[in-house]
Amino acid sequence: MARVYNFSAGPSMLPEPVLRQAEEEMLDYHGCGQSVMEMSHRSSQYEEIIGGCESLLRQTMQIPDDYDVLFLQGGASSQFAMVPMNLKKNGRADFVLTGQWAKKAYSEGKKFLSAHAVADSSDKTFTYIPKLSLETFDPQADYFHICYNNTIYGTRFHELPDTGRVPLVADMSSCILSEPVDVSRFGLIYAGAQKNMGPAGLTVVIIRKELVGNAGPEVPTMFDYKTHADNGSMYNTPPCYAIYICKLVLEWIRDKMGGLSGMKEYNEKKAKLFYDCLDRSQLFKGTVEPADRSLMNIPFITGSDELNKKFIKEAEAAGFVNLKGHRTVGGMRASIYNAMPIEGVEKLCAFMKEFEAKNA
Amino acid sequence: MARVYNFSAGPSMLPEPVLRQAEEEMLDYHGCGQSVMEMSHRSSQYEEIIGGCESLLRQTMQIPDDYDVLFLQGGASSQFAMVPMNLKKNGRADFVLTGQWAKKAYSEGKKFLSAHAVADSSDKTFTYIPKLSLETFDPQADYFHICYNNTIYGTRFHELPDTGRVPLVADMSSCILSEPVDVSRFGLIYAGAQKNMGPAGLTVVIIRKELVGNAGPEVPTMFDYKTHADNGSMYNTPPCYAIYICKLVLEWIRDKMGGLSGMKEYNEKKAKLFYDCLDRSQLFKGTVEPADRSLMNIPFITGSDELNKKFIKEAEAAGFVNLKGHRTVGGMRASIYNAMPIEGVEKLCAFMKEFEAKNA
C-alpha cells in the first residue's frame, strides 16, 4: 500500500496513527464487541467518547467555562443561517468579505437581518485581507463576522479586529486547531470538521453562553443553539463516528504534536518551507499578499495554463494529489493542514524544483 | 474478539462483512492511497461512491424517476422542520400520533403551519395503530404525516392510508430497507440512517420532484430541499464516510440478502421467532396489539420490575446488549434491524427460556 500526499482543501489528510487506530477498533472498540458506528449514543461507552472529545477540545483550545461546546451537523453552511437566527436582536450585523465563504455567510445573513459589508477584498480576487477601520463598525451590530482563514484564496487574519462589545463571530473551518487562539476574544467560533478535526459530517460550535437562548419561536428546534447546549449535543443522535475520530485527532495533537503550540510550530515550519520554495522559484509564484498569507492553504501559479496543467498531472502521477486550484483562482493550491507531514511538503518542493529545471 | 448481539434501538448493528470491508479499506480505498474519510468530495473516486450509493438505493427501493434522492444531515429531527418549511402552501397539515417521534414531528410542524392530529393512540401508551377514517382527513392539507414504524413502542402501519391528492409523508427511520415499499404512494420519505442504512450522521430524503422548489425566502438555504436537489447532495460537503458505509450496506442487501424481498423474508422469520417465543412464554409478554406489531422493534415485559432488571443484567453478561426498554414503556425492547443475524434472535430466545425456567 502506498499512501499519497493529499493536498485537498477538505476533506483532506488525517493523521496516519488515527486511521490505524480506527482500523484496529473497527469491529471491536475496547473489548465491547461493537464498532463505534454500532454503539447506542446513550450507552456509557459512547458517553465517554463524546464527553472525552469535549473535554479534550476544551483543554486543547483552553476554552473558558462560560463557553458551550456543541457538536452539530450541517457544515459551516448551516452556521451561515444559524448564527443570524440565534444572535439577532437589533437586526443588524457586520461582515468582512474576504472570499467565497465569507460572502456566503453574508448572503445567508441577509435572509434574516440587515447585513452590512464593512470591507471587501474582491477588487483583487481576494488576494489580501482588507484593513479594517473602527469607524466603519456598527456599535449596535448583533455580531461582527469574519472568515479567519480563507481556504480558496489562501489568506488569513493575522490580527483580530477589536469589536468592543459586539460579539466577534469567526468561521474557523480551515484553521481551527492549527495554532493557539484566545477563545475569549470571540463570541462564537464555528468550524466544519473536515480539514483539521476529523471527517466531514461534524460541525463544532464554540459559543459564549450568554449568546445561547435568544432564538425566536420561528427558529427550527434543530437550528436553536439552546436545543443542543441543554442536551450536551445529544438532543438527537449526533454524528457519533465523526466525533470519535475527532477525539482521536485531539489525542494525536496532545500526545504526538505537543498541543496547539507544538502544532503551530510544525505548521509554521511547513508553511515557511513552501513559501520559501515559491519565493525562490523563477517559475512558480504565490498569488497572495505576503503579509496575509495563510498557514494552511497556499495557492500558486506558473503564469501558463498549459504548464499548470502539466504540473498538476505529473505531480499526481508522483503521489501528490489534489493540487488543482479552485476554479475562481486557477493554477494550483496546496492545502497543508495539520495532518500533512513535513515530508510531504519537502518532497513536493523537491518535485517542484525538478519540474522547474525540466521546464525552464 | 467476541462480537456481541446488539439490540439497541439505534445506532445499532451493522453487517459484519460491511465492517470488515471498511476495516480493510480504512487506509487505502481501492489503491488510491487515501481513506474515504480523507477524499475530496469533488474527486472522481468520491463521486463514484456517492453516485453509486444513489443508484443502488434507487435500484433497491425501485424509486421512480420523478423522485429526488437526497443525502442530508441533521437526522429525522431536522426533517420535522424541513418538511413543513418546504411543503407549506395552504398552511395546514394532518398528523397521526403513534408515538414520541410522531408527536415531535407534530409539535415542530406547529411552528410553521396549523398542525392537526387526526388520530392518536396515546390513550393506551401507543400500543396500537389507530384506525383512520377518511372523513377526518383534510383534503386541503399540505401533507399527511405518519411515522411508519414506531421505534419506542414497537408498532407499525400494516396498511397505508389513502390520502388521495394530499402527499403522504413518512418517517421511515426505523424500517427503511427492511422490506419493499411502493415509493409512488408517498410524497416524501425520510429516514435517519443509523438503524438500517449505516452510521448516524446521514439522513436520506426521497421526495417527489414536484414537491421540491416551493420553499419561501425565509427558509435557510440548507433547509431548502431545492438546494440539495439542484446540487446532487453536494451543495456543501456531505457526510462522506456515512454515505460510503450506506453504499456498502446496500451492496450487502443486494449481494447477500436477496434485495428487499429477501430482506423482508429474513426479517419476518426473525420477528416470528421472537414473537412466538413471547407468545409461548408464561413469563415474558409483548406489549403491543398483535395486529400492529413491528418487524423491527419488540418491546416486552415480565410483569415485575425486579425481574426485568435481573434479565437485562444477565442478558448483557451473556452478550445480548442494549435490551433495556425506553423509559416511557419500561421493561425490555429488542430491536432486530436488518443486520441482526437470525442466530442472535435464536440465541436470545434460548436464553429467555433458560431464564424463565430458573425464575418461574
Image (spheres, coloured by chain):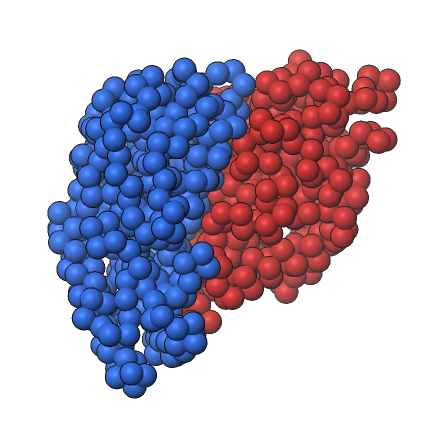
Chain colours: A blue, B red
Q: Is residue B183 left or right of residue A347?
A: right
Relative vertical location of residue B306 with respect to residue A158 in this rendering, above or below: above
Give the residue displayed 66% in from the left and 24% down from the top.
B98
Q: Position of residue B142 (x, y in %)?
A: 75, 26
Relative vertical location of residue A138 with respect to residue A330 in this rendering, above or below: above
Give the residue displayed 65% in from the left and 31% down from the top.
B215
Q: Is residue B19 left or right of residue A17?
A: right
Q: Position of residue B24 (x, y in %)?
A: 42, 67
Q: Is residue A29 or residue B135 the one in the foreground?
A: B135
Quarter containing the N terminus of chain B? bottom left
Give the residue displayed 20% in from the left and 66% down from the top.
A279
Q: Position of residue A352 (x, y in %)?
A: 27, 76
* Furthest-front residue in this view: A123
* Furthest-bottom residue in this view: A358
Residue B294 falls in image quadrant: top right
Q: Is residue A231 or residue B187 the one in the foreground?
A: B187
* Furthest-top residue in this view: B123
Residue B168 in view here: yes
Q: Position of residue A358 (x, y in %)?
A: 30, 86
Q: Is residue A76 left or right of residue B331?
A: left
Residue B5 in view here: no
**Total residue callouts:** 0
Give the residue displayed 41% in from the left and 15% down from the top.
A90
Q: Is residue B227 or residue A226 the one in the foreground?
A: B227
